[in-house]
Every structure is written in C-alpha cells, then in structure tokens.
Image: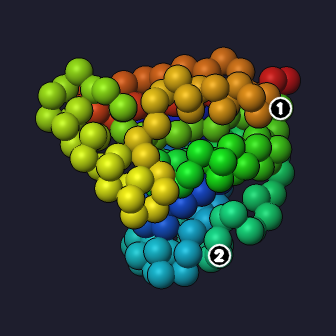
Amino acid sequence: MTTHVPTGTSLLDIGGGHAKYAIRLCKANPALHATVIDLPEALAVGEEAVTAAALTDRITLRPGDYDDLDLGTDHDTILLFNVVHGRPAEANRTLLTRAAAALRPGGSVVLLEHDEHSEDRAGDAFARVFSLNLFHGQGGQVYPTTEIEDWLHTVGLTTITTHPLSTSPGQSLITATKPT
C-alpha cells in the first residue's frame, strides 16, 4: 500500500476510524502528520491503536460526520478507503468536491475500493453480492472504476491511475492529483 500512496506532511483519512492506514503511513514517513475523521464510536478503536503505536503526537482523531465537518485545507494526501461504496453516487460527488478543495496543489486523493468485475472469480462473486447488499441497505454499490474516475475528473483532479492490489484480489487503489 505505501508504495502507491503519495505522502507529504499532511494526511487526511476520511472514514478511517480504526486509524490503521494513518498509523502505517506515519510509521513509513516520519515527517507525516495525519488527521482521521470518523464517527466517535469508530474512533474509539483508532484511539487505542494510535496510543499503542505511540503516535498520539502525529495522529489527530476528529469525531464527527465527514459530510458536515470542515475538511481543512492544504492536505498532501486524502484517503477515502472503503468509503464511496457505502454511499449514493450524488453524496460521493459532493464529498469528492469537498476533498479536492481540501488538497493543496499537487496533492492526491486515494481511494481503496472493490472492483466491479474482478478477474478473480471469488472476488467478483463477493463484489456482486456486496454491491446488492449495499444498494438495499445504504443506497450505495460497488461502483465501476470508470465511474469513480469520472467523478474525480469532474471535480478537477487529474493524473488518475488505478492500481489493482495483488495482496487483496478484487480491490484497487485509485489515485488522482490536484493540478499545480
């Protein structure tokens, strides 16, 4: 994961309550400071993990609904890992617009999502059932990569790349950069 996630000094992890990604990236990048935004009950797990990793001086946990909270500005990297599939398309477009505005020029948004039609048969079957469940339970779905890429382009992000994960068949990292 760390090889495909660009970092700088400021990371915003939207919906990363367990803080595992922020911890891993901060350990790999000593100059990085992270803010994790999620609901209070999700951050309770993250608080224990951040304390155990001795990173309380570099990882800030902000409780609240990321659809309502100020996302700040000048972030080098914004993570949206396993977020968009649980939301309706219009809510995702709005969140990505806000995320793009919170990036500094040259910064990147990175999404971790399931692939709509994975070449891995088990991954494909999982994604289809998962998508149906999301649609009926939350109004979301496993979105086609092309649709996510279109959202990113529409909010003004460029250099959009997709990296299928060999360590997690059926999932990909999608990265997009704010022009300088």
The quarter of the rendered structure image containing the N terminus is top left
Q: Nearer the viewer, residue 131 or 54?
A: 131
Left or right of 128 in this view: 16:
right
Q: Is residue 146 visible?
A: yes
Residue 132 in percent (x, y) is at 32, 49
Q: How far apart are the alpha carbons under marks 2 and 1?
A: 26 Å
The residue carrying mark 2 is 64
* CA neighbours of label 1 inside 10 A, class few (<14), some (14 to 19), many (20+): some
Q: Is residue 63 left or right of residue 154?
A: left
- Residue 158 vertical placement versus 62 (above, below): above
Q: Quadrant of residue 124?
A: top left
Going from the N terminus, do you reach mark 2 or mark 1 first? Answer: 2
Q: Position of residue 142 (x, y in %)?
A: 41, 41
Image point 65% across, 53% down: which residue?
Answer: 91
Q: Which mark is residue 105?
A: 1
| Residue drawn where x is 82% and y is 44% of the image | 101
Is 25 located above or below residue 48 in the figure?
above
Indicate the amino acid at tag 2.
Gly
Q: Can residue 30 be seen by looking at this rendering? A: no
Question: Which residue is located at x 23 percent, y 21 percent?
Answer: 119
Q: Residue furthest left?
A: 122
- Judged left or right of residue 160, residue 17 is left
Depicted 15 relative to depicted 101: above or below = below
Residue drawn where x is 81% and y is 23% of the image? 179
Q: Nearer the viewer, mark 2 or mark 1?
A: 2
Callout 1: SS: strand
The answer to which quarter of the image holds residue 151 is top right
